[in-house]
Image (cartoon, grey):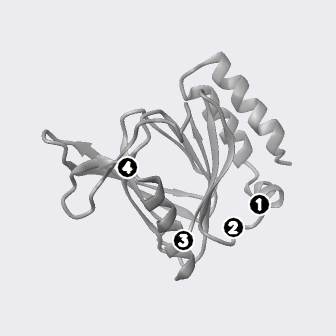
């Protein structure tokens, strides 16, 4: 059975032992081996939101709930990330940086229930929930997600700009209004 406090402690221990994503990925894989137990502990995803579960200078853990057919702009994290899907699906477009601050699509990954995927420190990606229902994911970051200097890319021009947390929050709110 998934225990949130134990999960957080296991992630903290993993980062203390190995600052790369490898040890944390194993912790998330163990937790995702029983996706329904995660839902029993943190609740059925009912609304699009990003819930902060833990934050420190070396580790951030979020419960990210993507609304039906919600799309999130290309962005980076400036740190490694582990994405674990406990319900639904998350489609990622991976982007390559070009000279001049623009990006171009370079690949894609579709993650479904039980999938655990690392994203490197320099990865730029956008996310879409292609389903007509909520998608729930545990996101673990190798640093302070909320204090890091991050970027997003304009969806029309694909030019880099500073990450806008307020605009990000509005995307979740807009998804809930739909």
Q: Earlier in the sequence, mark 3 or mark 4?
A: 4
> Where residue 71 sits: x, y (%)?
42, 66
* Front label number (4 vs 1): 4
Q: Which of marks 1 and 3 is nearer the N terminus?
A: 1
Residue bearing the label numbered 4:
75
Residue bearing the label numbered 3:
173
> Where residue 69 sits: x, y (%)?
47, 74
The outermost residue toward the left is: 100
Count of all numbered marks drawn on residues in the image: 4
* Front label number (3 vs 4): 3
Q: Give the answer, above or below, for where 130 lies relative to 39.
A: below
Tell me if mark 3 has few (under 14), some (14-19) or many (20+) residues whose alpha carbon lies within 10 angstroms of its own. Answer: some
Mark 1 → mark 3, Cα distance in angstroms: 22 Å
Q: Give the answer, above or below, for where 162 lies relative to 88.
A: above
Q: What element carries label 2?
A: loop
Judge from the rendering whether residue 165 lies leftward or rightward of residue 49; answer left or right: left
* Residue 8, image quadrant: top right
Judge from the rendering whether residue 5 lies leftward or rightward of residue 138; answer left or right: right
Mark 4 → mark 2, Cα distance in angstroms: 23 Å
Q: Is mark 1 on a helix, strand or loop?
A: helix
Mark 3 → mark 4, Cα distance in angstroms: 18 Å
Q: Give the answer, above or below, for where 116 lies relative to 169.
A: above
The outermost residue toward the front is: 166
* Front label number (1 vs 3): 3
Q: Which residue is drawn at 69% across and 67% down?
A: 45
> Where residue 129 sits: x, y (%)?
49, 67
Mark 4 → mark 1, Cα distance in angstroms: 27 Å
Q: Is mark 3 on a helix, strand or loop?
A: helix
The answer, for residue 38, to whether it is visible in the render is yes
Residue bearing the label numbered 1:
39
Of residue 159 and residue 137, the one placed in the foreground of this image is: 159
């Amino acid at each position: 059975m998934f225990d949130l406090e134990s999960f957080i402690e296991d992630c903290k221990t993993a980062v203390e032992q190995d600052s790369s994503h490898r040890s944390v990925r194993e912790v998330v894989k163990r937790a995702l081996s029983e996706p329904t137990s995660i839902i029993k502990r943190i609740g059925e995803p009912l609304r699009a939101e990003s819930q902060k579960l833990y934050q420190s200078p070396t580790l951030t853990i979020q419960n990210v709930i993507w609304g039906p057919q919600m799309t999130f702009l290309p962005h980076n994290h400036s740190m490694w990330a582990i994405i674990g899907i406990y319900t639904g699906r998350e489609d990622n477009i991976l982007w390559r940086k070009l000279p001049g601050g623009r990006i171009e699509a370079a690949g894609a990954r579709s993650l479904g229930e039980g999938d655990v995927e690392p994203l490197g420190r320099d990865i730029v990606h956008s996310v879409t929930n292609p389903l007509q229902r909520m998608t729930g994911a545990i996101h673990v970051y190798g640093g302070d997600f909320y204090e890091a200097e991050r970027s997003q890319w304009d969806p029309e021009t694909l030019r880099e700009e500073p990450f806008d947390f307020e605009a990000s929050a509005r995307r979740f709110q807009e998804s809930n209004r739909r």
